[in-house]
Image (tube, coloured by chain):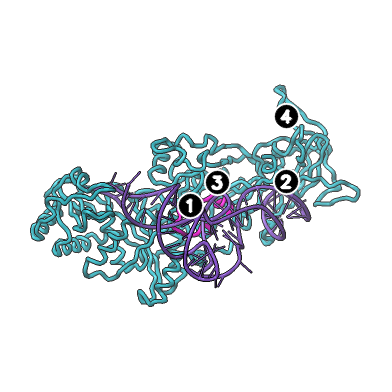
Amino acid sequence: MSDTPAAPASQDFIREMIAADLAQGRNDGWVITRFPPEPNGYLHIGHAKSICLNFGLALEHAPKSRCHLRFDDTNPTKEEVEYVDSIMEDVRWLGFDWGRHLYYASDYFEKLYAFAEQLIGKGLAYVDDQTPEQIRATRGTLTSPGEHSPFRGRPPAENLDLFRRMRAGEFKEGERVLRAKIDMASPNMNLRDPVIYRILHAHHHRTGDAWRIYPMYDYAHPLSDALEGITHSLCTLEFEHHRPLYEWLVNNVDGLPGAPCQREFARLNLTFTVMSKRKLLRLVKEGFVGGWDDPRMPTISGIRRRGYTPAAVRAFCKTIGLTKYNSLTDLQLLEHCVREDLNKTARRAYAVLRPLKVVLTNYPEGRVEHVELVNNPENEAEGKRLVPLSRELYIEADDFMEEPVPGFHRLKPGGEVRLKFAFCIICHEVVKDAAGQISELRCTYDDTTRHGAKPEGRPKPKGTIHWVSAAHAVDVEARLYDKLFTVEQPDGAAGEDGDFTRFLNPHSVEIVTAKAEPSLAQARAGTHFQFERVGYFFTDPKDSTPGRPVFNRTVALKDGFAKGKA
RNA sequence: UACCCCGUGGUGUAAUGGUAACACAGGAGAUUUUGAUUCUCUCGUUCAAGGUUCGAGUCCUUGCGGGGUAACCA
């Protein structure tokens, strides 16, 4: 894959705006972006879109550019260090680097507090003694204006005193808040005197017990952006109505080093998956999956463990584009991106997922030969390897049909097939057990067909299948992952208050013991393979142990035959 | 029955007043020691109606459809 983190994406409305800003000489030619996660959950593929955008922009505009990683840790009741660590790991894994520009909104608490006092002094903020219920009740509705708080006219000196006492911890949670004084009649609810500070007697993961009041996102975010000199603050569509408030703060607070500009883009939606943190958290907490990094999860850690590559995720993010249209991206596009990458880079190996024994009746007992297999047909430099072959083999059960359907050109009674890189075999006998199940196939091999030789006057078998030597094969665990949900839109299909978990795919994982070529026993954790004719697999970084690898199926190979039948 | 945003093939995007194109998916074929890959061909598109213009996917109006917004969450 030619994709690199710095590869420029096509022009989208954000990049056009930045180009226009640059053309007008704004920001002294700098492009400074930020990725601002709240450390209250794991990052998912939707965040990857934002990460690629923000860090990508910085790379595209080097050297007068950078992207900050800033944790939006303004709500101590929800945030944890565990999430901070995973987020940093995920961003790095995607191939991006924030350098020394790692920040926390909590680093600015003292400055943000001073700005709040400034707003109070200007008569632009006031302490409200109303209860949360009263505030909600007087905010009005979508179709009717709100009412002024009885405390709205409080003089600045009194507000200042009260606000300082809020900070000092003199009041209980919920007793008072600081509100911006804007417009209770605004059609934009965010401008109806939004709460900008609330009392929270909570321990913060970084500031400890130093604070009794914490700023709200709407207040902290624009000012943090401004403090860091962010030029372009890019977020998702649901913050569009917050933009006027964002701008109000940037314009009304004096002494800000920068004037960032917020723009919004559509978040990513993927078929057959849910993306909200709340829903993902539920899948984890209620044990529907093994954890945040379960390979079926759309989290970065999940898809990493599944075997997706950073390059594939980046290519995907580039392909989906950037618009304000609320779209639903086909999961197949993600799969296409990872196949495209892995096809070029993954080592090939032979593994039989559902083994069926084959005895070569004309192959001498006790004889073992070693066949040369190509490691990667897409890259000859990866060379070849030797794989043992003997009288008894395993082939994929799917590669034999006792009563073949039309168009099936693998092994059938009396039929011939090529064992890839070895020779052709003909099936003479189907052996069944007491239950009538096929237990073994008795075949003969043709020594004249070695190494792909096609003797004259001899019809060429249409099928080529993979195989492993029964005596040499190693048992390995393979986890066959499939879609987590059975419907394209689990949230939508669940309806208003329906439960999306009823659309969970009961077959989202199947664990089998595969028969693999011997070298696979030594596969190191975290290695990508293509099991020929089957799919791409990744040695599970968590559950693999030396000598006992566990293989996660990243994605199956496309199957033209299965498709034709459907 | 408020305000904001958005409507281009099945899906995701491009076309910046001048021949509607690319990718994925689908279909057909060629090649193939992976029914993979690769290659060729193919299917199929501007929400609607008016208006402006020599010319509209693009600009205007109205309608329709979708999304968002009433945490002391982010």
Q: Amino acid at mark 1?
A: Ser
Q: Please give the chain letter of the residue carrying mark 4.
A: A
Disc 1 + disc 3, Cβ < 8 Å: no
SS assignment at label 4: strand
Tell me if residue A432 comes above or below residue A388 in the rendering.
above
Q: Which mark is residue A546?
A: 3
Gap between marks 4 and 3, in whole Å? 34 Å
Same chain under badges 2 and 3? The reply is yes
Identify whether A479 is placed above or below A64.
above
Instruction: Tell me the residue at 47%/58% (across/down).
Output: A94
Mark 2 or mark 4: whose residue is earlier in sequence: 2
The cyan chain is A
The magenta segment: A319-336
Chain that is coloured purple in the picture: B
Please report whichever mark, 2 or 3, sits nearer to the chain's N-terminal start.
2
Task: Report x, y in % for residue A528.
Answer: 58, 52
Residue A327 is marked as: 1
| Magenta-drawn stretch contains A49 | no
Percent across and percent down for residue B60 are 41, 63
Tags 2 and 4 touching, CB below 8 Å: no
Mark 4 residue crowding within 10 angstroms, few (<14) / some (14–19) / many (20+): some
- Pick whichever, A281 or A179, lies toward us: A179
Q: CA distance from mark 2 to mark 3?
A: 22 Å
Of the two numbered discs 4 and 3 on the same chain, state the one appearing first in sequence. Answer: 4
User: Badge 3 sits on which subunit?
Assistant: A
Quarter of the figure with residue B37 = bottom right
Which residue is identified by label 2?
Answer: A388
Task: Identify residue for label 4.
Answer: A438
The local crowd at label 2, few if under 14, some if 14 to 19, many if 20 or more residues have their Cα within 10 Å, is some
